[in-house]
Image (spheres, helix red, strand yellow):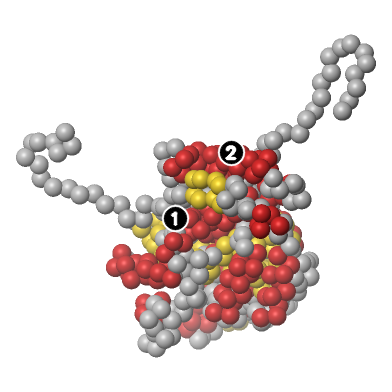
Amino acid sequence: MTIYKAPGVYVEEIPSAQQPIAGVGTNTVAFIGIVPPQIQYPVPKEYNPYLAKKQSESTATGSATLVDSAAIKSETATLEGSKKIAVSSEDNIKIEPDIHGSKAESEKNKTENSNKIKGSKTELEEAPPSDAAPTANKDTIRPYQLETFDVKPAPFITKLCTTFTDYTKNFGPFSADDPDKEHGVAFSPGHRALTHAVYGFFRAGGTRCFVVRVESDNEAELDKALKAVESIEAVAIVASPGLDQNQKVWDQLIAHCAKTEDRFAILDSPAEVNGTDGDFDITLLSYDNANSVLPKPNKNAAFYFPWIEVIDPAVELQDQDPARNVEKKYRGRVFIPPSGHVAGIYARTDAERGVHKAPANVAISGALNVKYYLSKIHQERLNPQGVNCIRNINGSIQVWGARTIGPEEHPEWKYINVRRVMLFLRDSIDHGTQWVVFEPNDIALWGKIRRNVTAFLTNVWRSGALFGATPEEAFYVKCDAELNPPEVRDLGQVITEIGVAIVRPAEFVIFRISQSNGTNPTN
């Protein structure tokens, strides 16, 4: 105790009985995908659209075409600027005109007419040198060229991304289709899915994610990637859009969430859910089917179906190639797994409304369509299985489901928001009560624990996450001699019991309408 000798005022700091518990973050995501050491991506180049058109016509008819160089001069003078892909600081993809002098291209193609037509006879003059006129082949008619990007991070190294630009600097831009194959066949399918997932995450409202690359989808590599993510405490959601969607991958993600005890997995459906006839087979999305493509029931994961259609700027550029014969309105359209966009919806909903708001009834930004059209009748069969449908509702692509996988197996955790609120409470109390360890286990400590946890849960109740007109109706905190008798204290334990009434979503909204005779039954 301090001894005071001189008269005066003394101000002393004393430890507060209050040790505030802060809520942990819930919107940081870890993405895992297959990314090779190098990826190829298209860049615009100047080309002769007239030659491209003629070459396309020639290929289609299987006959040779005589090209009038005077016509080339006329056509190339109106050459439109090619396009280039740019990513702005706000991470919005833009297609910008590449202003290269079409005049220079016109001058380059100025040649004398090499075909003199006299009556019905055609006289061909000597052909110009090879450098005087372009040759119509697959390279000259393509409006792009492929370049290579060396991926910077080694496998299993986590990279924090707070913007899409952070991602492209490390993992490269949108990657190319194989130009010798049909539209939509990617050189690196895993990289394409991962890139769209990260882009969709930020576009949907996400702010922070970690990205880990693997080079194959075997069990050992995914296990190493998950171990790399395990040590990052901020991660609350995991997804693997860049991997094949199958039971082994799903099992590993779910096991990771169970091990960390504070994470939730977003699982993508397989790209194709078709029967032997090649058409959509809804029975494959049922646990009653021996050939079911559903993950095993689990309270720490949600399953989304089907894939969504978006614009890929790299494919859009490649689809300008006349040899691909893609209509303008379909250029660049590809199907991708939805987990990245859905994770962005989770993050935005958490920030704007709170983790207790179900991440559903929200439009997916950037989505044009879905791979399989689902009606209300379809969803009546899928919802009880825990399949969260993505539906085209009046032209808007919406997340229209908020259930965990196989809700009948764990009815108390059948809603995503209920499970995530519990994970949030558990993790927040864990982090906020570390000061209790090694404190004297007495009545004073029990009182401090009750006060701190009660203060935290009161704030959670005020945010709307707990149901009840008063805090007493919404939760209770018990830490007393009944829970901590001598035999418990002798083991070095202090036990606190907490009960919470988490709000459920209004999944089924019912209005009962009838004719009235003029009386008001509410009076």
Residue at the image point whose x is 62% and y is 60% from the top: 262
Measuring 41% from the left and 52% from the top, which residue is drawn there? 504
- On the question of residue 71 being in view, the answer is no
Give left or right: position of 133 versus 309. Answer: right
Percent coordinates x, y for residue 291 in the rendering: 43, 85
One can see residue 130 in this view: yes
Tell me whether circle 2 and circle 1 mark residues in contact (CB < 8 Å): no
Q: Is residue 512 left or right of residue 284?
A: left
Relative side of 62 to 154, left or right: left
Position of residue 470 relative to residue 133, above or below, is above
- In the figure, 44 relative to 234: above or below? below
Q: Which mark is residue 360?
A: 1
Which is more toward the observer, 505 or 17? 17
What's the residue type where badge 1 is placed? Ala
Q: At 42% across and 86% down in the image, what residue appears?
A: 290
Q: Does residue 383 lie above or below 89 as drawn? A: below
Q: Secondary structure at mark 2?
A: helix
Between 367 and 156, the residue placed more toward the observer is 156
Extreme residue in the bottom direction:
276
Query: How much space separates mark 2 and mark 1, taking CA atoms?
Result: 30 Å
x and y percentages locating residue 188 in the rendered image = 64, 75
The mark closer to the camera, 2 or 1, is 2
Residue 455 tag number: 2
Quadrant containing the C terminus is: top left
Q: Position of residue 320 (x, y in %)?
A: 55, 68
Question: Residue most toward the left?
Answer: 517
Q: Residue at x 74, y 67 (%)?
A: 228
* Amino acid under disc 2: Ala
Quadrant for the N terminus in the image: top right
**Other residues around mark 1 within 10 Å, as few (<14) / some (14–19) / many (≥20):** many
Q: Is residue 155 left or right of residue 327?
A: right
